[in-house]
Image: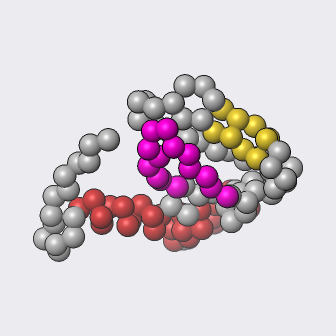
Amino acid sequence: TPREKMSEPAGGAPAGDTAAKAERARATADTLFAEARTLARGDNELLARIERTAQRQSKGRVGGPARHVDRVDARTNDWYTIPFRGGEPARLAVVGDGDTDLDLYVYDENNNLICSDTDY
């Protein structure tokens, strides 16, 4: 995949680096909920909604929702160990550029296949 050339802001770091760091800092659910609480100060109804949502979001992945961005070269495998709570719903997504067939397999701790998505 061709890489886009980044422009240099006045500070000297490539603009993409600054944006990527900001995205990583905002990617965790805890960070987003903290920001929402700050913005909702004084609005007790909105704060109550934020708290209800924060309590519900803990299902599935241990540690809460997360996002991981990576590059997988054609004809290679990438393996991730991500702990989930048993019996709770979980959502996974694999998004590609459309040039390569990406498959997803989910196994439990005993290496039993739980589900897979092998469509193009």
Identify the residue shown where x is 30% and y is 66%.
18
What secondary structure prevails in the magenta region? loop
The one of 95 and 63 positioned closer to us in this rendering: 95
* Residue 93, visible in the rendered structure: yes
Q: Which span is picked out in magenta? A: 68-81
> Which residue is depicted at the point 67% across and 58% down?
81
Front-most of residues 55 and 21: 21
Question: In the image, residue 101 lies at what x, y percent?
Answer: 51, 30
Q: Residue at x 23, y 48 (%)?
A: 4
Q: Quadrant of residue 46?
A: bottom right
Q: Residue at position x 54%, y 68% from top?
A: 31
Q: Point out residue 24 in the picture as x, y percentages from the top left corner.
A: 45, 64
- In the rendered image, the residue lying farthest to the bottom is 11
Q: Quadrant of the N terminus?
A: top left
Q: Nearer the viewer, residue 112 or 63?
A: 112
Q: Position of residue 54 (x, y in %)?
A: 68, 61
Image-based side of 96 in relation to 59, left or right:
left
43 over 105 or under it: above or below: below
Looking at the picture, tell me which residue is in the foreground, 76 or 72: 76
Give the quarter of the image for residue 85: bottom right
The answer to whether residue 49 is visible is no
- In the rendered structure, the answer to whether residue 96 lies left or right of residue 29 reads left
